[in-house]
Amino acid sequence: MARVAVGGALAQRPGYGGHAWALLNYLLGLRQLGHEVLFLDRLSAEMAPSAEARERCVGWLDAVMQGAGLGGSYALLAEGDAPGLGRREAVEWVGQADLLLNVMGFIDDEEVLAASSRNVFLDIDPGFGQMWRQLGLHDAFTGHDAFVTVGERIGEPDCLIPTCGIEWVRTPHPIVLDQWPVVTGGGRFTSIGSWRGPYDPVEYQGHRYGLRAHELRKLLPLPSLVEPVLELALDIDPSDYADKEALLAQGWTLVDPAAVAASPATYREYIQGSLAELMVPKGIYAETRSGWFSERSAAYLASGKPVVAGETGFAERYPTGEGLLAFADLDEARAGVEAILADPARHSRAAREIAAEHFEAKKVLGRLLEAVVT
């Protein structure tokens, strides 16, 4: 049995059920393997500038951990009182751990990093960190001993993401199948995400790498070309009013993620009430041929919900055609939707099979630990 600390940003995103699941699948998957886990988070005055904001952030973290059965397995590095392990206990725990799996290098506390015997960087936004480092804008990789990415084609000759001279361990996101049982039914194609996300487009080597907004604009006419409702639980800023109006005018159904995905439970219910997912990646993932595949899409697959996904190079690694269909343009997206409608039961079975074979947490995390633990 290993002891694994997982560091990530959760308290800072109250009400984002999908983001919570992205971290929970690692924690619960490691526990399924029999390992002892500790989740590490941090919260500064800049992240929560008021007492009310701090209370909301801290309460969200505690609620997510308690709800997942991890109430005694987390620590929040912050000033003042907070639930979970205290700083001294957390540092001691990390000092006895086999590794710290540090999501996007979020844990930068010098005492914690020094206590850890092996700091492993987990890249879940492939392209951004690597290009930022090459451009001299930000280096989150320093201080780590091994490097893992969900950009499963980083290092391939036609992948445009720089390796930064790093030997990357490539892995998909894990999905804990017990937490995502098959649920039949549903009539809508859905997805959950942000229009832009937390990062700006990146200018690198003469090319501007875009966000999800840029890929979705290419699909604007799709609702008029297919029969089912296409619904997005879309986090879109009021400043993008023109884009929102364009989506609505073209027949997209938009719902507020705060209404349907504000907790891990409601997020899961929303996915499992769908017929399938239409997954549109960020432009940077597609344009670089990163091989990225969404943890959200893995949850759809596990739930028996087929996925029509924008191609990022993942089709070279995973079976497509049944349960998972890749598209590179509007016509291929339409064909994917129509294929699922023609035989939804067959595609549902195939979706679950793909999740069990390729994304099941014990398999994925077992390989990951084997690759990074020396």
Image (cartoon, rainbow, N blue to C red):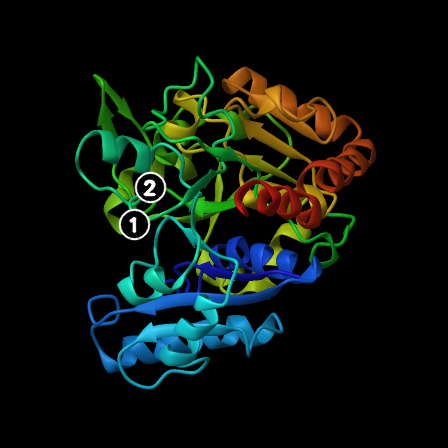
Vertical side of 187 occupied by 24: above or below:
below
Residue 41 x %, y %:
39, 66
Residue assigned mark 1: 237
Residue at 47%, 55% in the rendered image: 19
Instruction: Name the residue rendered at 64%, 56% in the picture.
Output: 29
The label number, if any, that marks residue 196 in the structure image: 2
Are the residues tagged 2 and 1 within 8 Å (C-beta)?
yes
Up/down of 150 relative to 289, above or below? below
Image coords of residue 15 (percent x, y) = 44, 65
Residue 288 can be seen, yes or no: yes
Of 157 and 305, the residue lying toward us: 157
Depth order, front residue of 199/129: 129
Callout 2: SS: loop
Going by the numbered disc 2, the residue's amino acid type is: Arg
Disc marking residue 329 = none
Q: Residue at x 53, y 44 (%)?
A: 372
Outermost residue toward the bottom in this view? 81
Which three-letter amino acid code belongs to the residue tagged 1?
Asp
Q: Is residue 188 visible?
A: no
**Label 2 crowding class (10 Å Cα cut-off): few <14, some 14-19, many 20+?**
some
Location of residue 334 (image quadrant): top right
294 shown above or below 162: below
Query: Residue 254: horizontal and vertical position, in percent?
Result: 46, 47
